[in-house]
């Protein structure tokens, strides 16, 4: 039987690429089940999560308060810059069909909040088709992920009109669809294209999203922004959780 096709998309900062590749059983399972091509976009900057500061990483109600200065980051947060050649070499283990590495543009920050992850994943997704969107039709599914998430367990059965994710929960009476990865049919990810083609306009537009405005700044988490980008609102009838055991690696 002919395998269905899947575009494996990685975006964001290139954190712990080799170690994640080694530990992640999910990517290996995907390659067994589907015909997989990998598309990658990365920024040269890297903010390192460690065992000392990872308590600031999660927006699940356990995150300690931060100052107005650091706000979204741990007090000891430090951003370093890697060179492009190093990142290209790190990602070569995926044998990517396409990879692009760029310096991060500070204009992608809103009040010290970085929107680079949305833009980076969108750019990686955009590269599936290049400038001919018909090229993307050769893929049945998309797996939109990151460099530092490793999982083990059964693959979700991808289905029409649905997006799988690691966890679904209600936090502060807000529906959350965890953003460590999203997977589903290609059509479910077309809302990413404007984020690749016109990032600054997309940043302005998402701030005017009615659902996010209703939640209010205090309650909006990173996952909610992803939900609004992909579905326009909470997407409660679209997101499905998997049965995979996930972890985010730390330095």
Image (spheres, rainbow, N blue to C red):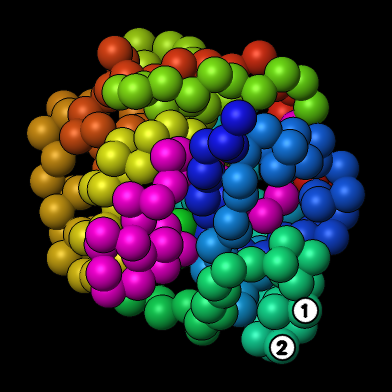
Contact, mark 1 vs mark 2 (Cβ under 8 Å):
yes
How many numbered markers are drawn?
Answer: 2
Q: Position of residue 73 (x, y in %)?
A: 57, 54
Q: Position of residue 214 (x, y in %)?
A: 16, 27
Residue 182 falls inside the magenta stretch: no
Residue 42 image-quadrant placement: bottom right
Foreground pick, 246 / 79: 246
Q: Identify the secondary structure beneath mark 2.
A: helix
Query: Which residue in the structure is indicated by mark 2?
Result: 85
Density class for disc 2 (Cα within 10 Å; few <14, some 14-19, many ≥20) is few
Would you place residue 164 above or below residue 3 in this image?
Answer: above
Q: Identify the secondary structure beneath mark 1.
A: helix
Foreground pick, 39 / 135: 135
Q: Is residue 160 left or right of residue 223?
A: left
Residue found farthest to the front: 1
The residue that appears at 77% across and 79% down in the rendered structure is 89
Query: Which residue in the structure is indicated by mark 1?
Result: 89
Q: Position of residue 125 (x, y in %)?
A: 41, 58
Q: Is residue 54 left or right of residue 127?
A: right
The residue that appears at 56% across and 74% down in the rendered structure is 99
Q: Is residue 39 left or right of residue 107?
A: right
Q: Taking the image as drawn, is residue 197 in sight?
A: yes
Which stretch did the figure color magenta? 124-151
Would you place residue 72 above or below residue 157 in this image?
Answer: below
Q: Position of residue 153 (x, y in %)?
A: 76, 21
- Quadrant (top left, top right, bottom left, bottom right) of the C terminus: bottom right
- Quadrant (top left, top right, bottom left, bottom right) of the N terminus: top right
Tell me the CA gap for discs 1 and 2.
6 Å
Would you place residue 124 above or below residue 2 in this image?
Answer: below
């Amino acid at each position: 039987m002919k395998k269905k096709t899947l575009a494996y998309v990685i975006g964001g900062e290139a954190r712990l690429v080799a170690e994640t590749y080694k530990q992640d059983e999910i990517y290996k399972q995907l390659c067994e089940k589907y015909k997989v091509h990998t598309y990658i976009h990365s920024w040269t900057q890297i903010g390192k999560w460690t065992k000392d500061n990872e308590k600031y990483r999660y927006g699940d109600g356990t995150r300690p308060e931060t100052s107005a200065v650091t706000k979204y980051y741990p007090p000891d947060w430090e951003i370093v810059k890697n060179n492009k050649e190093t990142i290209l070499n790190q990602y070569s283990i995926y044998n990517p069909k396409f990879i692009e590495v760029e310096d991060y543009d500070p204009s992608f920050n809103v009040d010290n909040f970085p929107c680079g992850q949305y833009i980076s994943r969108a750019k990686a997704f955009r590269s599936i088709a290049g400038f001919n969107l018909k090229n993307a039709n050769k893929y049945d599914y998309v797996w939109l992920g990151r460099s530092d998430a490793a999982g083990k367990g059964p693959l979700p059965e991808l289905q029409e009109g649905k997006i799988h994710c690691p966890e679904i929960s209600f936090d502060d009476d807000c529906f959350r669809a965890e953003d460590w990865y999203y997977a589903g049919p290609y059509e479910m990810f077309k809302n990413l294209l404007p984020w690749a083609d016109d990032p600054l306009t997309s940043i302005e537009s998402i701030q005017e999203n009615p659902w996010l405005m209703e939640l209010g700044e205090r309650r909006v988490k990173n996952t909610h922004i992803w939900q609004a980008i992909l579905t326009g609102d909470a997407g409660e009838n679209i997101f499905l959780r998997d049965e995979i055991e996930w972890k985010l690696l730390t330095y």
